[in-house]
Image: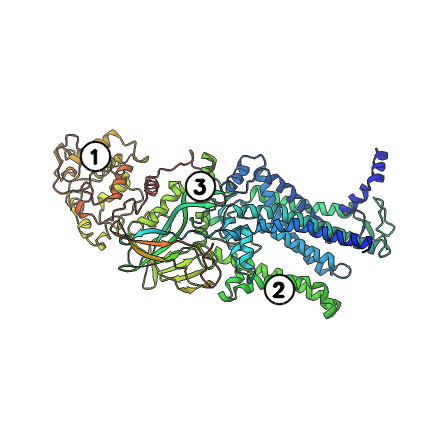
């Protein structure tokens, strides 16, 4: 190998190493969010069944401690859900987050519809799409009726979902 | 002096650098001067953004807990803070307009032709960077407007095919908004994009300068660029040097634009422009509301994008949902590609045709965007719900800003300002828990009227339980005593199971038998007894009754009223059913014929709290009660307290209520 081509080769290698020195930690640094642990799926009691009127959706706010990066917040609102009692001991629980692009969904009592004011998405009381740009109906949360202290309560596993897509994919 | 400078130039070549940097050393054609003002003005405006932006960085703090508060601080405490932020904001909008003008003139005068293709493309990239700077700057205050807009923008990124979800996670630093969202956004806005833009600007300038020198100075291609001594008297009569002829025109246009920016900053309302939406009882005058309420997904907000993305927003509403990505992803991509290919149009359709096509493309984009923008604004302004939402948002913004001014922002973050405020939280609690039966001045507390569809026509309906606006005050009580079965009180209560007994109960009978026209009691008697009971509430508006009126009230309550002739009036006293120490000092009426609510402390916080927790208690409605009990499982102490303080009008307010014009 000639002296000149050795130096060609050496500077190419060293430049590569220089780039790798910056690129590898850089990419790792920025992709930290992809390696977070998934959240716990604990069951939370929401509301007593007797406090719900059949067919009248109730908005229930969830309060809990929340950790955001390095901050652990004191108890505060972590989300909200619509609870619809559909029968004596049957309930539907929907996320209030519009599956279109994530605005909060209202309930319009006169029309018995859920309505998102951001892009005019509307849903029936059972969560199915009536009209609008959304690709799926309201996100249904896993719910069951449990007895707490002798009284039936609605409890759910709270989650948030990726908006804008066809499938209901929970956010990690 | 000049010797020193000559020496310095000899060693550093600074003159050449300076001239190159500020584009001074090439002649321009005399006739074209005014057409080329946009490039120079845009560069000057970019300088304004860099300097005002750096100033803002000295106060702004990119964290969820501090962002809103730091912007509020710089708006109110920092000298010229509001001006600097306003200038930064308005100039960014003017730059977007300026870039469109620049592009239009470049295309119409075919300034993209050989050898200027790369100059043209570097300009397009610069324009996208400025656009990205505007989009990333908007959410930084972490107020409702920026937060909700960024929420939607990042959701749109997430819907892009293949790379969408990954890009979204990278952008917001996780799956949900948090502190990392702000730090990433901030890094993009203050380092990544400005550095790229500065780099591109230098490239764009050097390309422009190179081309001017090549074409105007007849330099050989490939030769070194000449350093032209300045100011240079041109030998060509049709040509003048850039400095000072073009420079002064650029500066003049720049200053006109700055005058507009300053005017908008100082006198314009940057947030709420619809006059019909201005609420009357704001804590702050509208021009001081320069920031919206802190980002809180729990508060109602009607998100509308900034004007520069509004056309796409409108267009998106016009396509079916499964084609949405055509508008949010494919259309912008197609526009960018069509604009990038402009230099090649000539090759395909000839010089005249190419220029015409490019001009039609740009004019079409401007015209199309403007009509979509106009269409969207027209629709919003014709919509009373929009005006109402905006006026509510304005009230929340004004409230939050005023509270922050009075009490400072708590270390946990600005969201607590409104969440712990009776005026804001009270109506929301009322709407959630009470408005199923009760009304507040005819609506649900938040301003939404209770309505029902009757034969296809919407009409307001009364609640099945009393309207509680003014509850416990003298006016509310006397209105109730004069008409307990009116639509504002127990008129619809018989629709509830068991409510018949309340609607047609003792109070109704008492009214029919004891108050004029059928009984002896007059209006002043009713008002006096209402004053006596209202005093129990301790409400701010239930004080200052005259001794005389209270005495008369007590006489009515306990039944010792004389008429003008000094004869005692015959009527059923209140103490037969109700107990009230101030109305019945000797306690002669205790026991009562029929159980009725105790009136000691009526309408006070303690009375109301006990009542809401258990209205069926013996001291309230007893067995007649039809109102559900709200225990702590159903309604937290905190929410109940905020509700009651709101109902009683007890929230912090400015000393002198400023009346907006």
Position above or below: B357 against B608: below
- x%, y% of residue B489? 25, 48
- Left or right, B412 with respect to B218, comes to left
Residue B399: numbered disc: 3
Pointers 3 and 2 in contact (CB under 8 A)?
Answer: no
> Which SS class for mark 1?
helix
Q: How many marks?
A: 3
3 vs 2, front mark: 2
- The residue under the point 35% across, 37% down is B650
- Judged from the image, the secondary structure of the residue bearing numbered disc 3 is helix
Mark with earlier residue (3, 1):
3
The residue mark sitting in front, 1 or 2, is: 2
Chain to which the residue tagged by mark 3 belongs: B
Pointer 2 indicates a residue of which chain? B
Q: Residue at x 24, y 32 (%)?
A: B549
Residue B373 appears in the picture as rendered: no
Answer few, some or many: residues within 10 Å of disc 3's Cα (few below 14, many 20 plus, some between 14 and 19).
many
Q: Position of residue B637 (x, y in %)?
A: 32, 41
* Residue receiving disc 2: B334
The residue labelled by disc 1 is B553
In the figure, is residue B213 to the left or right of A121?
right
How many neighbours does mark 1 have within 10 angstroms: few (below 14), some (14-19), or many (20 or more)? Answer: many
Residue B50 in picture, x, y percent from top left? 65, 43
**Residue B58 higher or lower than B384, as above or below:** above
**Same chain check for tags 1 and 2:** yes
Q: In the image, is residue B253 above or below residue B583?
A: below
Image quarter hosting the N terminus of chain B: top right
């Amino acid at each position: 190998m000639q002296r000149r081509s050795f130096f060609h080769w050496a500077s190419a290698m060293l430049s590569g190493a220089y780039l790798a020195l910056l690129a590898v930690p850089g990419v790792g640094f920025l992709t930290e969010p992809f390696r977070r642990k998934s959240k716990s799926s604990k069951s939370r009691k929401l509301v007593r069944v007797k406090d719900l009127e059949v067919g009248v959706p109730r908005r229930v706010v969830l309060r809990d401690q929340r950790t955001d990066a390095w901050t652990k917040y004191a108890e505060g609102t972590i989300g909200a859900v619509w609870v619809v009692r559909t029968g004596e001991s049957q309930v539907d629980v929907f996320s209030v987050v519009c599956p279109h692009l994530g605005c909060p969904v209202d309930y319009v009592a006169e029309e018995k519809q859920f309505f998102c004011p951001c892009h005019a998405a509307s849903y029936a009381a059972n969560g199915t799409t009536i009209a609008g740009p959304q690709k799926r109906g309201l996100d249904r949360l896993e719910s069951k009726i449990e007895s707490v202290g002798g009284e039936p309560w609605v409890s759910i596993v709270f989650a948030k979902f990726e908006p804008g897509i066809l499938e209901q994919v929970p956010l990690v | 002096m000049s010797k020193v400078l000559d020496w310095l130039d000899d060693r550093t070549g600074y003159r050449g650098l300076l001239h190159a940097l500020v584009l001074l050393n090439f002649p321009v054609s005399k006739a074209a001067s005014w057409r080329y003002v946009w490039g120079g003005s845009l560069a000057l405006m970019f300088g304004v953004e860099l300097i005002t932006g750096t100033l803002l960085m000295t106060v702004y703090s990119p964290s969820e807990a501090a962002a809103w508060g730091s912007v509020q601080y710089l708006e109110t405490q920092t000298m010229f803070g509001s001006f600097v932020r306003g200038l930064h904001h308005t100039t960014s909008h003017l730059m977007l307009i300026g870039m469109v003008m620049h592009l239009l003139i470049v295309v119409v005068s075919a300034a993209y032709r050989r050898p200027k293709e790369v100059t043209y493309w570097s300009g397009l990239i610069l324009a996208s960077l400025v656009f990205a700077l505007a989009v990333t700057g908007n959410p930084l205050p972490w107020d409702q407007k920026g937060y909700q807009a960024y929420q939607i923008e990042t959701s749109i990124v997430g819907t892009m095919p293949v790379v969408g979800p990954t890009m979204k996670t990278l952008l917001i630093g996780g799956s949900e908004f948090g502190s990392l969202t702000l730090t990433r956004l901030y890094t993009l806005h203050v380092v990544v994009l400005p550095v790229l833009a500065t780099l591109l600007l230098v490239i764009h300038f050097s390309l422009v300068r190179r081309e001017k020198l090549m074409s105007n100075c007849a330099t050989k291609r490939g030769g070194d660029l000449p350093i032209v001594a300045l100011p240079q008297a041109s030998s060509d009569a049709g040509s003048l040097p850039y400095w000072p002829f073009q420079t002064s025109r650029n500066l003049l246009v720049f200053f006109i634009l700055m005058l507009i920016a300053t005017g908008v900053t100082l006198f314009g309302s940057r947030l709420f422009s619809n006059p019909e939406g201005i609420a009357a009882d704001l804590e702050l005058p509208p021009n001081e509301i320069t920031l919206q309420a802190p980002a809180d997904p729990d508060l109602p907000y009607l998100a509308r994008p900034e004007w520069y993305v509004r056309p796409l927003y409108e267009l998106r509403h016009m396509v079916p949902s499964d084609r949405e990505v055509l508008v949010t992803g494919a259309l912008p991509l197609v526009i960018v590609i069509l604009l990038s290919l402009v230099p090649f149009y000539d090759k395909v359709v000839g010089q005249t045709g190419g220029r015409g096509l490019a001009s039609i493309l740009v004019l079409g984009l401007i015209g199309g965007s403007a009509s979509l923008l106009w269409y969207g604004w027209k629709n919003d302004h014709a919509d009373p719900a929009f005006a109402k939402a905006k006026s509510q948002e304005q009230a929340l913004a004004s409230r939050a800003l005023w509270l922050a001014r009075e009490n400072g922002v708590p270390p946990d973050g600005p969201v607590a300002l409104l969440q712990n405020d009776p005026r804001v939280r009270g109506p929301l609690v009322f709407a959630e828990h009470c408005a199923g039966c009760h009304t507040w001045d005819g609506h649900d507390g938040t301003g939404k009227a209770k309505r029902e569809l009757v034969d296809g026509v919407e009409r307001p309906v009364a609640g099945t339980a009393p309207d509680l606006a003014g509850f416990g005050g003298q006016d509310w009580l006397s209105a109730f005593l004069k008409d307990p079965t009116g639509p504002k009180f127990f008129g619809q209560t018989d629709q509830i199971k068991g409510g018949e007994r309340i609607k047609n109960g003792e109070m109704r009978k008492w009214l029919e038998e004891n108050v004029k026209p059928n009984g002896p009691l007059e209006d002043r008697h009713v008002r006096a007894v209402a004053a006596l009971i209202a005093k129990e509430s301790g409400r701010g508006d239930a004080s200052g009754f005259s001794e005389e009126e209270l005495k008369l009230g007590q006489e009515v309550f306990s039944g010792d009223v004389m008429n003008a002739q000094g004869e005692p009036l015959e009527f059923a006293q209140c103490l037969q059913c109700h107990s009230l120490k101030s109305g019945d000092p000797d306690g002669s009426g205790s026991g009562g014929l029929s159980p009725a609510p105790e009136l000691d402390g009526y309408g006070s916080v303690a009375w109301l709290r006990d009542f809401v927790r258990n209205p069926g208690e013996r001291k309230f409605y007893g067995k007649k009660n039809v109102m559900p009990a709200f225990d702590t499982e159903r309604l937290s102490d905190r929410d109940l307290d905020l509700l009651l303080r709101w109902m009683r009008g007890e929230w912090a307010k400015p000393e002198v209520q400023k009346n907006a014009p």
